[in-house]
Amino acid sequence: MCFVFRFHDNSTLIIYFLFYKNLYILLHTNNYTYIYGKFLLLMVCFLMFLKVSDRICNLFEYLHDFDLKNSCRVKSADFTRSSPLNFVNLILMFLAKGGKSNTLELMGFFDVVGELWVSKEAFSQTRLKLKPLVFKKLKEFYLSMVYENKDMIKKMNGYILLACDGSELELPHHKSLIKIFGGTKNKFGEIKSCMCDSNLIYDVLNRFIFDFEVDAYKTGEKTLAYRNLKNLFRLSFLKKYKKIFIFDRGYRAIEFFHYLMKKEEKFIFRLRTIDYKKEKSKLRNNDQNIDIYISLKNE
């Protein structure tokens, strides 16, 4: 059993590596419950891969795009020399990582691609030349292929449903991260946990994340949500879709209402019980329209 590709480079080898690594484990164990479960998992993965194989091939080909490399390297001189850990291999290395130590990951990766493997120190130095922006660009490129076929996208009454939500995330307790993100403090004012704020916009029917933002602790959900929206409205492939944005009660703000109305977008905000008491007192049943008049300071 194998995959057939339209291209022949290290990307191909990585897919083979990930598949046959699991197949090797499957064939070298006597635990029949494990074998059955692993076999089902491989079959599911294989069928899913056949369904999206063209998109994955196009995504890997996109890694060789000069504009992508030029916009996602820290300096113009980065990734110009011939090296086993070039721009494409570095990204593939990140995508193929399975949770082992960097040394073992590098040995496994370069054994597959058939090149001299580099040290973990060289890997740590080289990854500093890569902007995190590259993963956003890869995500947007992939989503553009998914959403190009309007008939294949799940909708509710002709609308795609986009939910916005956020959370506080705990990060590794390292001084460089603490300097950037901050965190929770103890009674002595010392940071005891490194934390950050995060927020995303998610297609709830098709299960794709459109945008994900992180920033310093206590940045606030509304600030990050506004960035999410600005990034989302840049995506040209979404302009042909009718959308309904869904927000939890922490996001309720006149500024958001006005911003989305100017964009001619539909939205739903969950409200607190204390919000708009005067207007809600006019309700005579559970399904009724109420006008809320908004006056802006600059009008």
Image (cartoon, rainbow, N blue to C red):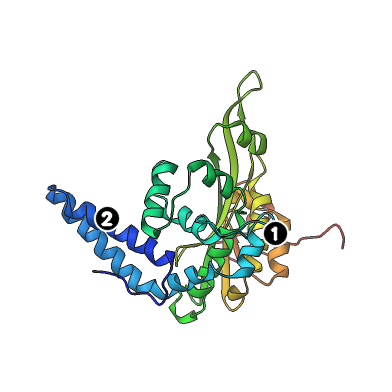
Question: Relative to 80, is 154 on the left or the right?
Answer: left
Give the residue at x 50% y 56%. Answer: 84
Q: CA distance from mark 1 to mark 2?
A: 39 Å
Q: Are marks 1 and 2 in contact (CB under 8 Å)?
A: no
Q: Is residue 183 above or below residue 221?
A: above
Give the residue at x 54% y 58%. Answer: 86
Disc 2 element: helix
Q: Which residue is mark 2?
A: 22
Q: Is residue 270 above or below residue 266?
A: above
Q: Which residue is mark 1?
A: 76
Image x and y of residue 276, in percent: 67, 52
Image x and y of residue 291, in percent: 69, 65
Q: Earlier in the sequence, mark 1 or mark 2?
A: 2
Q: Which part of the image, by quadrant, shows the C terminus? A: bottom right
Count of labels in the image: 2
Q: What amino acid is found at the position of numbered circle 1 in the picture?
A: Ser
Query: Disc 1 or disc 2, which is closer to the eye?
Result: 1
